Amino acid sequence: MNTAIALKRGISAEIYKYRSTFVFWFIILAPAFIPIINLIVFLKRGDEIVERGGTAWGNLLQFSNGPANFLFPFFVFIVALFVSNIEWNSNTWKLIYTQPINRLSVFFSKLLVFVAMLFVSLMLYGTLILVVGKIVHTINPDLGFGDPFDLVMLYGRTFRMFLATLGFASIQFYISQRTKNILLPLGIGIGGIISFMIVVQGWEYAMFHPYGYHVAASGEYVGARSLLLENMQPIYLSLAVFLILSLTAAIDASKKRIV
């Protein structure tokens, strides 16, 4: 079977498996958690927040980015676990590997769908931030959300976060593929986040910690613009980790193994 056709069929099969499951709703509803909280906060205390300084949009972004940097890794952990454990729980790995489909096509189908889930969720998150501002402006026009807002800046920052997340996302994906024990990848992920929070306090090499790339790559917000192309090192490191782990996992998946 042609590799491109096999990959296309694999991706279609993966999407079909998830469309009526928890993960489908999770990638749609989870991004709304922080925006909904911020909507309530700005409707009740918007005037007080803006009076402290900064623009309405700037304050909304600050209220969004901090919680997102902390919570999004846990979203990645859960999605990585679900993408892999749907096979472990149903004991279908043996069935999949007995099909006349290249093992690399199976692996890359899962990887691409996993990455697409993260991308869609983050873009939806960025869109919901914009929606929150528009809703608050409709209810309280004097707050400042009627001022011009740079959509390139909003989605650019969101895309930076996506790229900076791929490093540790590939780690979680690989571990979840290798074991049916859900506690192991979850424990490693939480340990990674905690260890970054410790080393970032003063260790000079903390920038190389893969579970902190998304924090280090947060685009600096200055007034009405965002420095999207500044501080690209964490993104390059994240993409390097993603490439290395993906190739390693692909080689591993291509070998015969007992499942």
Image: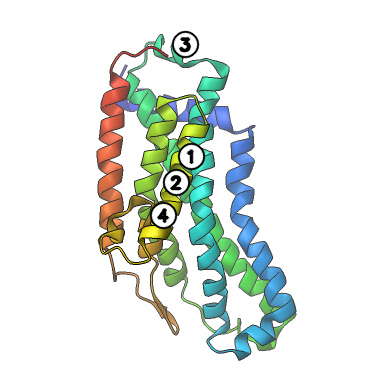
- What residue do we see at 32% from left, 23% from top? 253
Label located before the other in sequence (2 or 3): 3
Q: Secondary structure at mark 3?
A: helix
Whether pointer 1 and pointer 2 mark residues with C-beta atoms closer than 8 Å, the reply is yes
The residue labelled by disc 4 is 162
- Is disc 2 surrounded by few (<14), some (14 to 19) or many (20+) residues within 10 Å? few
Residue at image point 39% right, 74% down: 220
Kindly identify the amino acid type of the residue bearing the numbered disc 1.
Answer: Gly
Residue 38 position (above or below residue 149): above
- CA gap between label 4 and label 2 equals 21 Å
SS at circle 2:
helix
| Residue carrying label 3 | 95
Question: Could you say which disc has been placed on residue 187 in the image?
Answer: 1
Seen in the picture, residue 242 relative to 156 is either above or below; the reply is above
Q: Are marks 4 and 2 in contact (CB under 8 Å)?
A: no
Nearest to viewer (mark 2 / mark 3): 2
Could you tell me residue 104's position as x and y percent?
31, 24
The three-letter code of the residue at mark 2 reads: Gly
Q: Is residue 23 above or below residue 122?
A: above
Colour style of the rendered protein structure: rainbow
CA gap between label 2 and label 3 equals 34 Å
Q: Which residue is mark 2?
A: 191
Looking at the image, which residue is at 58% across and 66% down?
Answer: 129
Give amino acid for label 4: Phe
